[in-house]
Amino acid sequence: MGLLTRTTETAPCTVEVVHKFEELSAHVRLDNGAVINPGDTVKVQGPPVLAGYGEAVSEQRTAFITRASTLERFWTRLTGDMEFMELCEFSFSEEATL
């Protein structure tokens, strides 16, 4: 993989959407075992998968995976770690701080 080169691949996937009182979720499982790395993007082909209230729907689709370049992957890891640390900087108190 090049420093600035992106590659694209396809993979079969399963889209699962649950719309119930106890669970509201949507998941994409790549059926060929492909691993998504920092900076990669995944786009699922086809119309949106809709589940009515009380339903769970599962559909087979094709996913397009765009692999990040080496530079993008490095940048995503670097900035992602910093953003995570921002989430850790919090406190709970009864007094308002200015």
Image (cartoon, helix red, strand yellow):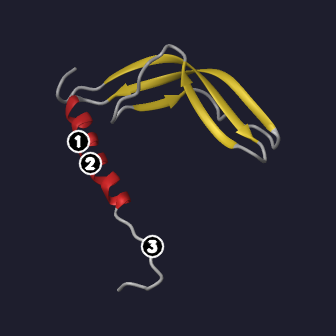
Q: Is residue 15 left or right of residue 80?
A: right
Depth-wise, is mark 3 or mark 1 nearer the camera?
Answer: 3
Q: Nearer the viewer, mark 2 or mark 3?
A: 3
Percent position of residue 64, x then y = 46, 24
Residue 17 lies, in percent from the top left, at 68, 35
Tally the numbered discs: 3
Mark 2 crowdedness (10 Å alpha carbons): few <14, some 14-19, many ≥20: few
The residue shown at (47%, 16%) is 33
Q: CA distance from mark 3 to mark 1?
A: 32 Å
Q: Quadrant of the C terminus?
A: bottom left
In the image, farthest residue toward the left: 3
Identify the secondary structure beneath mark 3. loop
Check the picture and name the quadrant holding the N terminus: top left
23 or 88: which is nearer to us? 88
Residue 41 x %, y %: 41, 33
Q: Which amino acid type is shown beneath numbered disc 3? A: Phe
Q: Residue at x 31, y 55 (%)?
A: 85
> Viewed as shown, does residue 23 lie left or right of 96?
right
Q: Secondary structure at mark 1?
A: helix
- Which quadrant of the view contains residue 65? top left
Circle 1 is placed at which residue position?
Answer: 75
User: In the rendering, at what x and y percent does residue 14 appear?
Assistant: 61, 22
Of residues 87 and 19, which is closer to you in this image? Answer: 87
Question: What's under tag 2, amino acid-wise?
Answer: Thr
Residue indicated by mark 2? 79
Give the SS element for disc 2. helix
Given residues 61 and 81, the one toward you in this image is 81
Residue 91 located left or right of residue 73: right
Question: From this viewpoint, which residue is outermost toward the right?
Answer: 54
Residue 92 is tagged as: 3
